[in-house]
Image (tube, rainbow, N blue to C red):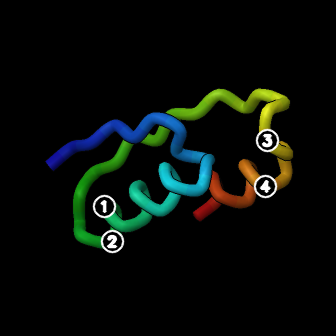
């Protein structure tokens, strides 16, 4: 199954995208790197 996860560099989105990928699903991860959260934290989540 194919999924699009918005907010994929945030905490919940990154956890969801990782869980879906681990279950063998195809995941397209989308996020907007705004100043609302520290960019280093979002970049770390995006690498998972």
In which quadrant of the rendered view does residue 11 lie?
A: bottom right
Find out whether the residues at labels 4 and 1 contact each other: C-beta distance under 8 Å.
Answer: no
Q: Residue at x 34, y 62 (%)?
A: 21
Vertical comparison of 7 with 17: above or below = above
Instruction: Kindly indicate whether the residue at mark 4 contacts the one at mark 2 (C-beta within 8 angstroms).
Output: no
Mark found first going from the N terminus, 2 or 4: 2
How far apart marks 2 and 4 lie (CA) works out to 22 Å
- According to the picture, the residue beneath numbered tag 2 turns out to be 22
Q: Where residue 24 appears, x then y in whole percent? A: 23, 66
Q: Is residue 7 above or below residue 14?
A: above
Q: Are marks 2 and 1 in contact (CB under 8 Å)?
A: yes
Q: Residue at x 43, y 64 (%)?
A: 18
Label 2 – label 1 distance at C-alpha = 5 Å
| Foreground disc of the pair 4, 3 | 3
User: Split into 4 quadrants, where in the image is the C terminus?
Assistant: bottom right
Q: Residue at x 34, y 37 (%)?
A: 4
Q: Tag on residue 37?
A: 3
The extreme bottom residue here reads 22
Q: Are marks 2 and 3 in contact (CB under 8 Å)?
A: no
17 lies left or right of 32: left
Q: Which mark is residue 20?
A: 1
Q: CA distance from mark 2 to mark 3?
A: 26 Å
The label number, if any, that marks residue 41 in the structure image: 4
46 on left or right of 2:
right
Q: Secondary structure at mark 3?
A: loop
Instruction: Answer left or right for 20 relative to 12.
Output: left
> What is the C-alpha distance between the residues marked 4 and 1?
21 Å
Query: Is residue 18 depicted above or below 13 in this figure?
Result: below
């Amino acid at each position: 199954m194919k999924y699009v996860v918005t907010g994929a560099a945030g905490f919940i989105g990154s956890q969801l995208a990782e869980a879906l990928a681990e279950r063998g699903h195809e995941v397209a991860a989308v996020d907007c790197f705004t100043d609302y959260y520290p960019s280093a934290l979002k970049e770390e989540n995006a690498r998972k």
